[in-house]
Image (spheres, rainbow, N blue to C red):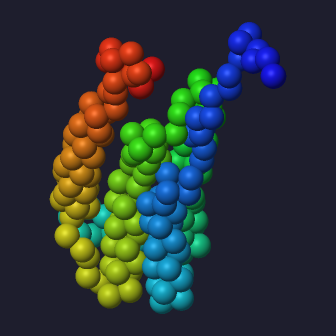
Amino acid sequence: MNAINTDATVKETRKSTGFRWAYIILPAAVLFIAVIIAAVFYGKLPTQTAYRFSGGVPVNWLDRGGVLAWALGLQLVFVLLSLAITAFVTMASRRMQLAETPLNRTLFTIIGNVVALPQIIIAYAMLDIFLYNISGKALPPLWIFALAVMFIGGVVLAVVFARAFVQSRKLKTENISGSESDVRK
């Protein structure tokens, strides 16, 4: 008969939270769309491109390569920021030995993808600059678009946080002895 060693520690088989590309999919998608917009319009831009306007009249001009570098450079910075933040958060969760749960995945997805909101505004500004310099027509004011994006983003975040809160309430479970315990710990 084999003896059972009761002093041995039992290792938990919880799966640790790791990085997922879904955590930064929106910033990466916005960068991809901005690159496509730039590729379509770059050859049509004049050498000196207006990038700042006052009352619908150009105030500042820059070489078209400079406008493109600023616009796409900012997009890239936001993607790298999103990547760094999610990498830090997932590393911290692994260090704290947090189990991979739907709630954690939802929260990490929010953390990484919220960066797409300012990216969308920058892409809109880039498109507005390109359209004005090519056709002389401007899109609706940037501030109106920015308010709309932030409002819609706020509503989406509120809904996702509400769903995550409800989901966290469901994580309470009953253990074998019948007493209630919280698995979020």
Residue that protrudes farthest toward the top in the picture: 7
Residue 127 in sight in this render: yes
Q: Position of residue 42 (x, y in %)?
A: 52, 83
For this orientation, the residue located farthest to the front is 1
Q: Residue 106: x, y in percent?
A: 40, 45
Is 16 located above or below residue 128 in the figure?
Answer: above
Residue occupying image coordinates x 40% and y 78%: 130
In this view, 156 is above or below 66: above
The quadrant of the picture occupied by the C terminus is top left
Which quarter shows the N terminus?
top right
Q: Left of 175 or right of it: where is 65?
A: right
Q: Position of residue 137 (x, y in %)?
A: 26, 82
- Name the residue located 41 percent from the left edge and 55 percent from the top edge: 116
Above or below, 139 relative to 43? above
> Which residue is located at x 34 percent, y 59 percent?
121
Of 46 and 121, nearer the camera is 121
Residue drawn at (56%, 52%), measured in percent from left and top? 20
Q: Can you see residue 62?
A: no
Q: What percent of the width, then of the height, locates residue 78? A: 51, 52
Indicate the quadrant where residue 10 lies: top right
Depth order, front residue of 64/100 = 100
Please name whichever residue, 29 or 119, is drawn nearer the observer in this view of the structure: 29
- 117 vs 49, nearest the viewer: 117
Number of numbered discs on residues: 0
